[in-house]
Image (spheres, grey):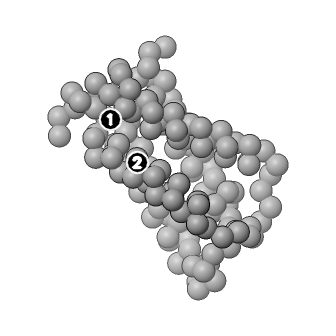
């Protein structure tokens, strides 16, 4: 298996877990926040918009678009800053016991996606892509 195929497999797994997490209300989608207290449909629409935006970024990464790599790196950097300052979250529903373990694995996959997008030969795929 070459590096590009592994890179695309990582993107596929990460996107599939994002959809599963959203559809079943696991992980961050099950947390209680002020948007859910306003109106349940506002939270649903907000979550759907964020999932669609991430899926568009993953599609851009799949086709080696430079804008997607930049936005994804900014998204990951922003998430690291937010994690440092966020307060304790309370979940509305109990997730299955395997979800935290898989979430930690997804953090590692996200780091691998970022690292592989800046390392050869995947970096050359981004460099040769026409804008």
Q: Please tell me which residue is depicted at 17% across the width and 34% down the height of the picture.
A: 130
Task: Locate residue 98: give its quadrant.
Answer: top right
Q: Is residue 25 above or below residue 127?
A: below
Could you say whether the residue bearing mark 1 is in a helix, strand or loop? Answer: loop
Q: Is residue 107 above or below residue 77?
A: above
Q: On residue 19, which mark appears?
A: none
Q: Please tell me which residue is depicted at 57% across the width and 49% down the height of the picture.
A: 18
State the residue in front, 22 or 78.
78
**Earlier-in-chain disc, 1 versus 2:** 1
Residue to which mark 1 is pinned: 63
Outermost bottom residue = 38
Residue to which mark 2 is pinned: 72
- In the rendered image, which quarter contains the C terminus? top left
> Horizontally, is 27 left or right of 8 in the view?
right
Tag count: 2
Q: Please tell me which residue is depicted at 32% across the width and 35% down the height of the picture.
A: 63
């Amino acid at each position: 298996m070459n590096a590009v195929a592994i890179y695309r497999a990582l993107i596929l797994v990460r996107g599939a877990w994002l959809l599963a997490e959203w559809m079943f209300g696991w992980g961050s989608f099950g947390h209680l926040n002020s948007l859910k207290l306003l109106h349940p449909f506002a939270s649903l629409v907000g979550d759907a918009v964020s999932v669609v935006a991430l899926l568009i970024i993953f599609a851009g990464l799949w086709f080696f678009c430079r804008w997607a790599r930049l936005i994804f790196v900014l998204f990951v950097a922003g998430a690291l800053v937010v994690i440092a300052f966020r307060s304790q979250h309370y979940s509305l529903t109990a997730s299955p016991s395997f979800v935290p373990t898989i979430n930690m694995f997804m953090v590692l996959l996200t780091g691998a996606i970022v690292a592989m997008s800046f390392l050869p030969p995947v970096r050359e795929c981004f460099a040769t892509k026409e804008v």
